[in-house]
Image: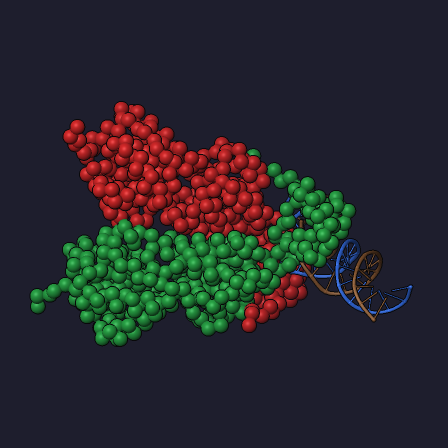
Chain colours: A green, B red, C blue, D brown
DNA sequence: CAAGAAATGGCAAACGCTTGCCATGTGACC
DNA sequence: GGTCACATGGCAAGCGTTTGCCATTTCTTG
């Protein structure tokens, strides 16, 4: 019933069949220029005939390289990360690497443990929206190459979205609709991108002479909406900028429940432009990032740090552009009768 | 700049430090009952002190088991699979297994190649919505244990949604609204679940004396919408059941573009209840599956087939229930003036 | 044509762990 | 006290590659 464990040909079988030493066969596969062209062709042909496929585990043991990298994300189900995953998947495949996926459940402890657990099994990590501290990250980077997505930590390879420009776009947009203030519904306290977003919003608001207040932290999910709304509404805000789209959509739903109209009574802005932002009700104005690009780029950055890098794709573009997608959830500031 | 390759303690280091043989240390970790309780405690303490962590690669080479499984999905970005991934992730972690993720790009060739490439690197596969033929799957199963999600192939472990019941629910729902016929906008021809869905719909329609017609195949994505709509509208359908939610949403958008109202002019039903279905415009009536459960269950089924299974969780429930979520995209059949 | 360089292939030692088999120690039982 | 089964630990042979080093050949050059 189970699979038949019929022995598969090994490198030695090929060596014997081809009448050469095992080392020659090995090199035929991994060091083409280290071996005579004709010998190589011969070996390859014999290998082909035998149906030989190198055993990745043995290769890893021998070489110390697993040709595998790990991608850690806080929540696989969050569509924001789907883009990162997809991009990383592609880039990894292109580089001949296998990708293992880890869900850290938005949890620093789980993240640290996952790193620990996978450390020996992979050649490096891409960590998206890490919840670890800079020191923890640097410590981990002592042991494995690491590239970060949406998190800048000195000394590590990082790929980040351009929040300075992005937040300014948001603030300008709100200002142009006459809003004189807004509320920021913050996400997890450990979120680096959350901090960047708030920082950028504050700076842009100051430039424009607008008032910005922060509430939270809230869960960056639909479920975070109610709490955020209740606080924001109580404060009399005319616009609420949310840590991400999930929260923004949760906020809009809660607003609807409470009888507030979007955007007539209050404008809502999100971050990420996730799948769904363009068909929720109303459609969501949000700051779009190039998530797939970020994932792919991070893998490239990581590959640079791997021993025996062959690619030299390195470009300076590690800050990825963002752009505001204006939809139906933002509008003119309401006229209050007070 | 790169990580310092400081040597990590090996099993032999621990053995030496503990004054026992390497085999004893090995067994202390992997065969608790094969060794004296006190010796084990001692070894474990020494290992702890040294910061020893077994090298998974070496373990794999020695034992032939990688403690890693692969999950193959047609499209990581499709929120339907996010649930499966999440469930599989959890179950794998619970079983102490590492999960490798593969995106087959809805492509049988890519899928087959991925299996081939990972075969030696993992202990088994969970394949979701496989596009391979039964024979191909069985051939692959000769070499590695395989569990299937939403695909039944004789001889393999399978976890499927209860489409017979689900499609009947859909048809009953439409019938109760007075629809006398509907159109099915089909997905990829190789899709097993697509076939099951259509089969169930047909059977249920026949029971109810309704007429059902099938169009397609269409891309099971937003982009598939336009083509599906153009065909469906031309046929004068009052209801269109779509292969999945992505297509359904694409269909609704196209309908709106073409000036048709949902559900007043035409009702739309999807499958999967993906994230977004509850807040698209209008909200989508759809058949919900327990995707995370399916992912988790499939991993359990796979684990059963692995050598040295310890769990005996096996239950007969491999057909997971489905339920229709009625929302705003379905309504009474329109009164036509002809 | 000699001498040194470069190309090529082989040998054998890792890589770090697992596991079959054997030796010893221990207590049970008669 | 002797026999035996069992518990426990050690030995050493793998597992299938990679790779440093050396020996031969084959080229280059002056």
Q: Is residue B177 above or below residue A112?
A: above
Is residue B20 shown left or right of residue A182?
right
Q: Is residue A334 above or below residue B229?
A: below
Residue B318 visible in the displayed image: no
Residue drawn 56% across and 61% down? A311
Residue drawn 66% across and 55% down? A30
Residue A88 visible in the displayed image: yes
Task: Name the image quarter holding residue A270.
Answer: bottom left
Quarter of the figure that contains the N terminus of chain A: top right
**Can you give x and y, in whole percent of width and height, for residue A223 in the image?**
28, 56
Q: Total label count?
A: 0
**Can you give x and y, in whole percent of width and height, for residue A11 in the image?**
69, 48
Quarter of the figure that contains the C terminus of chain A: bottom left
Residue drawn 19% across and 65% down? A177
Q: Nearer the viewer, residue B324 or C30?
A: B324
Q: Nearer the viewer, residue A268 or B92?
A: A268
Residue drawn 27% across and 24% down? B209
Task: Name the image quarter holding residue A256.
Answer: bottom left
Is residue A53 shown left or right of residue B332?
right
From this viewpoint, which residue is outermost toward the left?
Answer: A337
**Can you give x and y, in whole percent of width and height, for residue A79 in the image?**
36, 54
Q: Nearer the viewer, residue A18 or A6?
A: A18
**Can you give x and y, in whole percent of width and height, for residue B329 in the image?**
24, 41
């Amino acid at each position: 019933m189970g699979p038949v464990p019929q022995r598969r040909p090994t490198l030695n079988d090929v060596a014997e069949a081809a009448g050469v030493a095992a080392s020659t066969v090995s090199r035929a596969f991994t060091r083409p220029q280290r071996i005579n062209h004709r010998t190589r062709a011969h070996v390859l042909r014999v290998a082909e005939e035998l149906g030989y496929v190198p055993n990745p585990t043995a290769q890893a043991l021998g070489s110390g390289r697993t040709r595998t990298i790990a991608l850690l994300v806080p929540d696989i189900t969050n569509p924001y990360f789907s883009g990162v995953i997809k991009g990383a998947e592609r880039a990894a495949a292109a580089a001949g690497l296998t990708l293992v996926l880890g869900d850290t459940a938005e949890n620093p402890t789980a993240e640290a443990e996952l790193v620990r657990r996978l450390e020996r099994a992979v050649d490096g990590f891409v960590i998206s929206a890490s919840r670890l501290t800079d020191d923890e990250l640097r410590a981990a980077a002592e042991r494995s190459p690491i590239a970060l997505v949406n998190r800048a930590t000195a000394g590590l390879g990082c790929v980040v979205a351009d929040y300075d420009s992005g937040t300014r776009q948001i603030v300008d947009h709100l200002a142009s609709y006459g809003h004189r203030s807004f509320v920021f519904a913050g996400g997890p306290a450990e979120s680096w991108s959350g901090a960047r977003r708030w920082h950028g919003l504050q700076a842009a608001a100051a430039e424009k002479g607008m008032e910005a207040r922060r509430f939270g932290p809230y869960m960056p999910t639909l479920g975070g909406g109610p709490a955020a709304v209740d606080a924001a509404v109580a404060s009399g805000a005319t616009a609420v900028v949310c840590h991400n789209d999930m929260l923004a959509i949760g906020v809009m739903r809660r607003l609807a429940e409470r009888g507030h109209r979007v955007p007539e009574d209050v404008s809502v802005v999100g971050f990420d432009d996730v799948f769904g932002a363009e068909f929720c009700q109303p459609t969501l104005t949000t700051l779009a990032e190039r998530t797939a690009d970020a994932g792919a780029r991070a893998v490239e950055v990581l590959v640079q740090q791997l021993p025996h890098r062959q690619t030299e794709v390195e470009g300076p573009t590690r800050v990825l552009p963002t752009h505001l997608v204006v939809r139906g959830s933002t509008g003119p500031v309401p006229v209050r009768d007070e």
